[in-house]
Amino acid sequence: MQLNRRDFASLALLGTGSFLTFRPRRARSATEIPIEKMRVAVGNVPSFVYAGFYVGLDRGYFAARGLEVELVITRGGDAAFQVAGNTLQFAGGSPDSAFFNGLARGLPLMPISSLAVNPADRSSNILMVRKDLLDTGKVTKVADLKGRKVANLVPGGITEYLLALHLRTGGLTVDDVDMIGPLGFPQMVDALTTKAVDAAMLAEPFATMAINKGVGAVLDDQGDVGEQILWIQTNRDFAKEHPNIVVNFLIGFLQAARDIARETFHGPKILAIVEKYTKVPADIIAQAAPPLIPPNGELNIKSIMAQQDYHLRRGKLTYRDPIPVADFVNTSYLDRALDYLGRYPG
């Protein structure tokens, strides 16, 4: 089912919840999805947010659907261009400036399911401050960061948007701080250690690593709860040509997401798989705030559109009017996967 504006208008009348899994207008009985064998390249950056890919691969869920998954390490926004060029068939992606500008240029990018969101109780993307600044009382609240150096992953990226939400809790904007970037997360921990920056927007497990090293402390882990971190994206033309491949990939992913939901991210078997693919020690994973891997593939549409609006207001996009979500999100493949598996919990 390709969503249109009428579908979204109807959904908006159902309630005020931010998380939506788009459903067909009438219930359908579960149907078998034909198996078509294919090797697919899947982009990832070894981190917690890709746990659904790792569990699906490790437990054979993708293989059971006829897919030979090759994990390919990518660098942030590069994944979108590789998906557009079909050198990657699937990858994580976010509603950042690179995505929207690529979409405006006609790149065949298509989000099809959620990959990871921030939990509703505690963010897995944390605004950290140098511990010595906290200990001496120089920075004890978000408002104290005004004029100070704050490390950010990449300008116009999702971490800038999340940083803006954290800063907002102290009445600040990104213009009120000296953003230092681009910096990778390991380099941010080093910058806190050498006192090159005063604070940093750190994804887990790097926030926990900074705490354990004694160089960082949590300043805010609530400002961006519930926000969409990553989605699963594919090439629109590839999906039209191989719809069953896309559906079977989502079936494998959702089976993994449900294992994570049942066993919890900190369950010993899940910990072992995440450690295997990220090389992060299990004890660090156990201490860190994990992302939420939605077991029904829910996308936070409110967050997605808010991110587009943020980048528009910041002048990061090459167009003026927002692109309607119905013009780029397609959950028809997710609908079929959910028809096959049933909704969680069953």
Image (tube, rainbow, N blue to C red):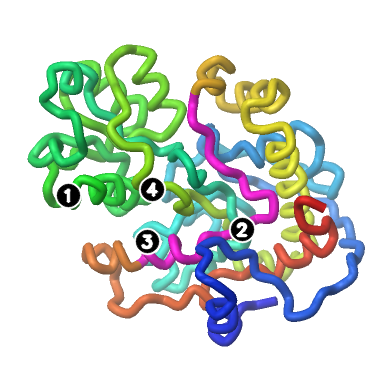
Locate residue 188, reporting x and y percent.
Answer: 29, 28
Is 118 in front, or is 40? 118
In the image, what residue occupies the spot 82% across and 42% down? 63
Locate residue 73, reporting x and y percent.
Answer: 53, 37
Would you say 202 lies left or right of 176 here?
Answer: right
Secondary element at tag 4 = loop
Image quarter in which the N terminus is found = bottom right
Secondary element at tag 2 = loop
The answer to whether residue 307 is magenta is yes
**Badge 3 local density, few (<14 within 10 Å), some, or many (20+)?**
many
Residue wearing tag 1: 172
Would you say the residues marked 3 and 1 are in contact, meaning their CB atoms lie under 8 Å apart? Answer: no
Residue wearing tag 3: 307
Residue wearing tag 2: 298
Is 80 in front, or is 211? 211
Residue wearing tag 4: 224
Locate residue 79, reporting x and y percent.
Answer: 49, 50
In the image, what residue occupies the spot 13% across and 17% down? 136
* Amino acid type of the residue tagged 2 in the rendering: Glu
* Amino acid type of the residue tagged 4 in the rendering: Asp
From this view, report whether residue 138 is shown above or below residue 54.
Answer: above
Would you say the residues marked 2 and 3 are in contact, meaning their CB atoms lie under 8 Å apart? Answer: no
Would you say 192 lies left or right of 139 here?
Answer: right
Secondary element at tag 1 = loop
